[in-house]
Amino acid sequence: MFGRRTLLAAAAALALAIPVAGTTGAQAQQPPVRIAVIGPMSGTGAFEGQLGLEGAQAMAAVINAKGGVAGRKLELLTYDDKGSPEDGVSAAKRAMEQDNVDMIIGGWFSAVALSMKEVTRDKIITVMTSSQHPKVTEEGHKYLFRLNATSAMMSEFYSKAICDRIKPKSIAFMNVNDDWGRLELDNYTKLLTACGIEVKGHEFYNRTDTDFTTALTKLKSLNADAIYVAAINTSQGATIYRQIKQTGYRGKVIASAGNMNPKLVELSGNSLEQVYSASPFTEDGSAPSLKPWLEQYRKDYKNEPSFIAALGAQAVQTLAFGVEAAGGDPRAYDKIAAALKSQEVPTVMGELRFSDKGQASQAIHLVQVQKKQIVSVRD
Amino acid sequence: MDFTVFAQQIANGLVNGMAYVLIATGLTLVFGVLRIVNFAHGEFYMLGAYITYFVGTLLGLDYIAAAAISAVVVAGLGVVANKLIFWPLRRDHEFTILLSSLGLALLIANGGELLFGADPKYVESPFADEVLDIGTVTLTQQRILVFAAAVVALVAVYLFIRYSRFGKMMRATAQNPDGAALTGINIGLVHTYTFALACGLAALSGALVGPTVMIFPTIGNWAVLKGFIVVIMGGLGSVTGALFAGLLLGVIESLGGGYISLGFMEAIGYAMIIAVLLWRPNGLFSTARGLR
């Protein structure tokens, strides 16, 4: 066995070797800003993780092509959280302790964001992406920012659209059984009951389920005018939308806010036709940085640009803006946080404004699937 | 109680159960004849679904042809896996074989993610969205096809094992490999055939179930888990046991999910295993060593 002395010597040698390797790589240039992208790269959420990463990489490429941020290139390091809180926590620890990254992008699922923020608490700038649970920012920390609208913000906007435009007489819910899915049920039950829509019942399905006929058979028998589906995961969502039609349900289908993407439309066949959703991302937006990002994304990847990918891009833009404002130092966390909270951040989805708790306000649009395209519905 | 919903849940359960039976039959054959616990079995299910998808989209063949080709190709892959891993290890400890199969499962699943991409895919089938009303029960043609094709495949497997020369060789090997070898049975050939049959069945079920859900590279986990529940419940090595246990699991899951709670659907399978094992420690249909 190795003695303690050998181990110490080895550790010392490693400690010496690492900075040397670092300086030879960068040479005359400034060292890159190292950003950890922690997301579900495997498991059932792998596709969302891939989209988010692609969006972030395309934006990093756009920024790097223009010379980077204050003369420093952006370098993205990828970590897999497998969509699970435990793996998210260990990925964040690895990124901070072993790889010594400057900043973190993560939190695609609420459950992961909620536990990961405790590891990064007050230690490192952390941008949470698609998670919608209010506690992510309500109980966040001084370096935490979250891009997606909270489920409360989303439901406030979307419930109005459901009440005024879609107008079902009664509704039943098909929600994923996690923090977010349960919160959605609470929110919409309150908001829709308030405008006179009868809530007939709900089913919670598990995040690992692949077949939903049992749940949908029950929901169909409630004879509700509409079924509201709260599914984040693209593969589960597509199966649910198809199986709703396959069980012979002929009522309206309403997709949860923030979870409509081109892949879902492609996989769902005709079953998403005329279905509404709400999304901060539309391809016909007017932000100046949208076009170069769309071009770069289409050039590098075969997927269609989506809301999740746009969030990835937005996360990189937010960090880049903060570093620029802090004079190019990615470790000046207080300066970066102050800059992000006091100025408007221009992104692919328009100007972002962060609250004191780090919550972004995004403009949300009503969208509908028409002829297999997601189009924004304007009044 | 609403009879329409009850009948619909039973029908859902029978279709799901039949898919479990197809997966479990291959698993139980490999165990019964060769004494191999194959954790990679679910991966062959995944490959079956993916190859059906790729033959359909890249070669433009229709769904039935694609499914048939996929079953044959995966049967071939099963033979290769046997030649490379299971045959050379046949004299090693059972744990060595078990761990190797686990390694193979990880290799295929991660290789699949690399090769096919992580994005979910959909196996197109002309029967997927065609709804049939049988009395008060609504099923898609695809679900009826899953059930019917599984019945045909299982009858064929049964007749093959019971009456064909190779089937008899398989049964002899299952009873006593050394004794079978002494009577001149080519054990290597039996290995090859058993793997081809088992993996072909796994692929067939992947191809059949594929169009009812979305496919992604880690669906094998789900398949092998269901397969093991069924095999343990029915009795390791028992084909009849797999049939009854599979249908039972499907129906109980769907009634449990329908009338108690969806959250418990997964737990029901495990609870059933415990109940069955307490009552009959070798499974419902297990008696002595051999293939039944």
Image (cartoon, coloured by chain):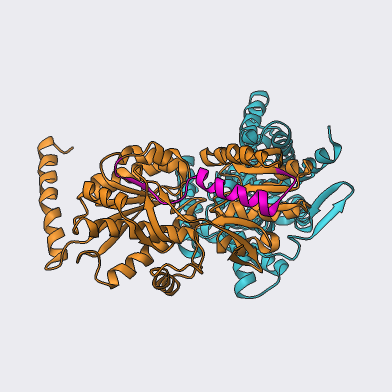
Chain colours: A orange, B cyan
Q: Does the stretch in magenta take in A144?
A: yes
Q: Nearer the viewer, residue A358 or B270?
A: A358
Work out whether residue A201 or residue A349 is closer to the camera in this orientation and state it: A349
Q: Residue furthest right?
A: B135
| Residue A238 rendering spot, x and y as whole percentages | 62, 56
Q: Left of B208 or right of it: where is B73?
A: left
* The one of A155 and A257 positioned closer to us in this rendering: A155
Q: Is residue B270 left or right of residue A306?
A: right
Q: Is residue A316 above or below residue A289?
A: above
Furthest residue toward front: A379
- The picture places residue B111, in percent across and down from the top left corner, at 46, 59
Task: State left or right for residue B32 relative to residue A313.
Answer: right
Q: Is residue A149 magenta?
A: yes
Whether residue B239 is visible = no
Q: Residue at x 50, y 57 (%)?
A: A280
- Judge left or right: residue B68 versus residue A109: right
Question: Can you name the residue that lies furthest to the top here?
Answer: B278
* Residue numbers of the magenta segment: A142-171
Residue A31 seen anywhere in this rendered image of the structure:
yes
User: Residue B196, how many percent across, how many down?
Assistant: 62, 58
Residue B77 appears in which quarter of the rendering? bottom right
Q: Position of residue B233 (x, y in %)?
A: 66, 35
- Quadrant location of the N terminus of chain B in the rendered image: top right
Report the quarter where the C terminus of chain B lies.
Answer: top right
Q: Nearer the viewer, residue B20 or A116?
A: A116
Q: Across the whole image, how many numbered discs are drawn on residues?
A: 0
